[in-house]
Image: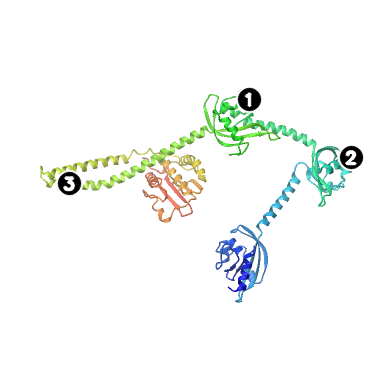
Amino acid sequence: MHRDTFILTTILDTLTNGIYVVSEDYKVLYMNRTMIGWFGDGVGKKCHEVINSSRALCPWCRCSQILEGESGRREVYVPKADRTFEIDESPVRMPDGTLSKLSIYQDITHRKQREARLKATVEDYRTIFEHVAVGVYISTKEGKFVDANQALVDMLGYASKEEFLKIDIIRDLYLFPDDRQRFQAMIERDGRVVDYEVQFKRKDGNAIPVLMTSHVRYDHQGNVIGYEGINVDQSQRYQMERKLREAHDFMNKIIGSAPISIMAADLNGNIIIWNKMAEKTLGYSAEEVIGKLHITKVYPEGKAYEIMKTLRSREQGGVGVFPPQPVLYVRQDGKIIEGNLSAAMIYDDDGNETATVGSFVDLTERIDMERALSRTQQQLLHSEKLAAMGRLTSQVAHELNNPLYGIMNTLELLKSEVPEGNKRRKLLDMSLSEIVRLADMLKKMLSFSKPEQEIKKPVDVNTIADEILMLHEKQLKEHNIIIKTDFDPGIPQVHASTNQLRQVFLNMVSNARDAMPEGGTLTVKSFMAKGFVNMQFADTGVGIKQENIGRIFDSFFTTKSSVKGVGLGLSVCYGFIKDHGGDIRVDSAPGEGAAFTISLPEVSSEKTE
């Protein structure tokens, strides 16, 4: 490399701005180190592939205009780098006479963020200034208003802010001019005035009591140039206090009528709040517990002290917080209740502990339902395994029957050619006897593989699918999977076995969950099409390779790297649906998820069995 070129390249690589050169055909000829750090080394590649990871030109591209002689500076947000740049572009003529585009990228992301924050802060300040419910002002030391919000203008009865800003504070605002002098003496001595009560005059001359809180404004040399603060109409304050009392009463009503159990106790453990739901859930009336029952009596032994220890610990939710977690409660009749407790410490204005408050959600019914659903799931899984084993047994028995009967016939022929009493005849009889015994065993296996047919009756596929989704809801949430449903309430019933449909739908949901290890969306919908009731399970998972789609319903075929079963789930489901006169279709592509559509004939279109 030529020494001058090396020095120039070294200098360009030390710059914090990104520099690159693009030829007429959009090929990157040069990138300095900063540019490579942002977008990777793209020399030799198309500029839009490097800058925007796109085969098409960048939306902000002006290469043709630049090469025609234009220059310019503009701001551009580049998604690939997640940065905002100020870009200077100009044409340059290369040593071989061709034109290229020189681009200089200056990262202004932080500047734009600061500008946005500053703008938001100014706007927020102005919004607060204009919309706060009390009078806010800025005034000079000499007695003129510089700015005021609409609340202050309205409070003092002026028609507009422009009119209000023209008044003389001493003459037109203060009912007693001496109050202005006392105010200035206090605020310039202490730098602020807090809750100073004074009488103002409204425009109509009526007096209005005002509570002032203000502080001094200084110039850059520390000289007092004015004051700013808030003025609160005392009549409004009285009205607010009344509203606060009403709000307090309203909050008491909310606590009393809340659909969850709410209770509070002082630091000695004496119960001070006990709402209606607590009465219903735990069996005690408020009269029986408030000031009479110790909080430890509603928990298993030692639990109340454990909760208090957590409230004072920095672990888990932090000091003063008991995060939601399962807790047992003891009813008045001694029955144990399961649920979630959230609790918090209550502090006074000085930060001292005064009481504890907790809310309890009774989850007994939900937990019982989850346990029942879990048992149902296990039963369905067991049913699937039995069905798979039956199909396997049936296949094995059928495959062995034909050669066994062939051997049996051969032995019978050999037996007819050997005289009775011959030693070989006895050997043939023994062999034939064992073959007959083996054939009898196979008959029993076939009998086992064909249990009594499931009872079929009119069923609602929406109800069955909804039950299965409820069964899997918690598990799917733990896998970051969102459930979406779109059930057609008007679809007819189908003639089917409830248990077998449950097994099919359960298998679809389980497969969808396994196909979305990083989470995703499972969409389940029902609809009518060509006289068939359809139930579709669509996931946003990894999808199925094209070469595997035709094999997924084969016995023992699986694509899972960690095989939990034997590959019989979809095979069994397919058999069930075919036995019902229906079909299962699958649409999928790698990386685009999979959609399984189960079609069943409606009741009215089926033949009566």
User: Contact (CB < 8 A) between labels 2 and 1?
Assistant: no
Q: CA distance from mark 1 to mark 3?
A: 93 Å
Q: Report whether 34 appears left or right of 467.
A: right
Residue 75 at x, y percent in the picture: 66, 61
Establish if 18 lies above or below 560. below
Q: Disc 3 vs disc 2: which is toward the camera?
A: 2
Relative side of 73 to 416, left or right: right
Pointers 1 and 3 in contact (C-beta within 8 Å)? no
| Mark 3, residue position | 411
Task: Using the numbered discs, state the Cα–Cα distance from disc 2 to disc 1 in whole angstroms.
Answer: 55 Å
Q: Quadrant of residue 48?
A: bottom right
The location of residue 84, given as percent across then percent down, is 64, 59
Looking at the image, which residue is at 48% across and 36% down?
A: 370
Q: Which residue is mark 1?
A: 290
Point out which mark residue 397 bears: none
The C terminus - image quarter: top left
| Residue 24 in the image, given as x and y percentages of width and height | 59, 71
The circle drawn on residue 178 is 2
Disc 1 residue type?
Ile
Quick one: label 2, few (<14), some, or many (20+) residues within 10 Å?
few
- On the image, which quarter does residue 454 sit in? top left
- Secondary structure at numbered mark 3: helix
